[in-house]
Amino acid sequence: MSKRIGLWVFVLLCSIAVLFLPSAAADGPVVRAVLFWSETCPYCHVVLDEVLPPLQEQYGDQLDVLAIEISDPANYPVWVSGLEAFQVPPERSGIPMLFIGDTVLIGAVEIPERLPGLIEQHLAAGGVDY
């Protein structure tokens, strides 16, 4: 699959998922990201339980993270489309994996180290969509 087609499939599938989520109004720019995780992944739970809650508290409605659990057979192809669209090398295709703008963050070390700075960067630039 070409990069452009893979990217469109990824965006389309994420957009469809967003239709089923309640919407919240935010004042000002919004940073949106997609987190792929698995119920059986302890590193995923570190990100979900320890990293994201303080960021969500700090930024409120200006931070919107769509969490997609990839053990669900319906969600796994969305993750694969993201891997293809962003040309993630096989050696980096682990979880947790977070897509924010044109950046892919992987793991319970890289996500907490880089995500706060990326949120600030995207808010300063007017926000970023899925």
Image (cartoon, rainbow, N blue to C red):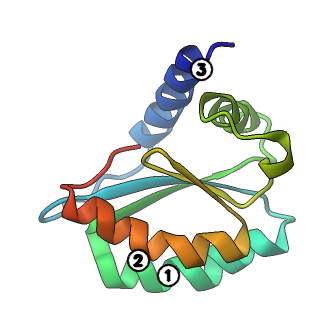
- For the residue labelled by badge 1, is the local secondary structure a helix, a strand or a loop? helix
Q: Which residue is mark 2?
A: 56
Q: Residues within 10 Å of mark 2 (few under 14, many from 20)?
A: some
Q: Which mark is residue 34?
A: none
Q: Which residue is mark 3?
A: 3
Residue 91 x, y percent position in the rendering: 86, 48
The residue lying at 63 percent from left, 73 percent from top is 48
Q: Residues within 10 Å of mark 1 (few under 14, many from 20)?
A: few
Of callouts 1 and 3, which one flags the residue occurring earlier in the amino acid sequence?
3
The residue lying at 53 percent from left, 17 percent from top is 4
Q: Is residue 18 rendered to the left or right of residue 124?
A: right
Q: Where is residue 127, by image quadrant? A: bottom left
Q: Which residue is mark 1?
A: 53
| Amino acid identity at mark 2 | Gln
| Amino acid identity at mark 3 | Lys
Residue 79 x, y percent position in the rendering: 69, 39
CB contact under 8 Å: marks 2 and 1? yes
